[in-house]
Amino acid sequence: MQKFFAEFMKFLKEYKVIGLAIAVIVGGAVNKLVTALVNDIVMPLLSAVTPSGNWRGITLAVGRSQLAIGSFFGAVVDFLVIALVVFAFYKIVLREDKIEKVG
């Protein structure tokens, strides 16, 4: 049983499973934060400036088909906000100081 436990611990360390688990948990928390930002701040502001207020429900009729233009635009806005948050996280948290090489 000790050999199995030792191999298991080696596996956890070698493949950095604990770090990956932490990253998944933090990623889930960031997802909740970004979702709240989009749903509770960005989208109400966009709804306030559109005439009907329900811009996600806007459709475009093409023959017998209905194109969900508002839903697509909402997905684009969601993506842009998430990309902005990830970029800000990269710039602020993961910033590395450049080391100058002495020739």
Image: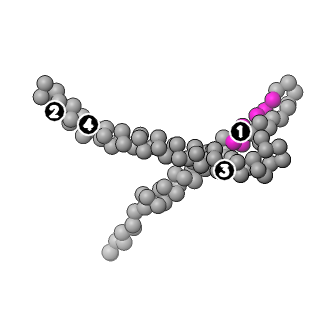
Label 3 amino acid? Val
Dot 2: element: helix
User: Is residue 71 at least partly visible in the picture?
Assistant: yes
Label 2 amino acid? Ala
Residue picked out by circle 4: 12
Residue picked out by circle 3: 42
**Furthest residue in direction left, as rendered:** 2
Circle nearer the N terminus (1, 3) = 3
* Residue 38 in the figure: left or right of residue 29: right
Label 1 amino acid? Phe
**Furthest residue in direction bottom, as rendered:** 103
Residue picked out by circle 2: 6
**Residue 62 placement (x, y as % from top left):** 85, 31
Identify the main secondary structure in magenta: helix
Q: CA distance from mark 2 to mark 3?
A: 50 Å
Task: State if disc 1 and disc 4 touch (CB < 8 Å).
Answer: no
Q: Nearer the viewer, residue 51 or 103?
A: 51
Residue at x-position 83% and y-position 35%: 60
* 10 Å crowding of disc 3: few (<14), some (14-19), many (20+): some
Q: CA distance from mark 4 to mark 1?
A: 41 Å
Residue at x-position 57% and y-position 53%: 84
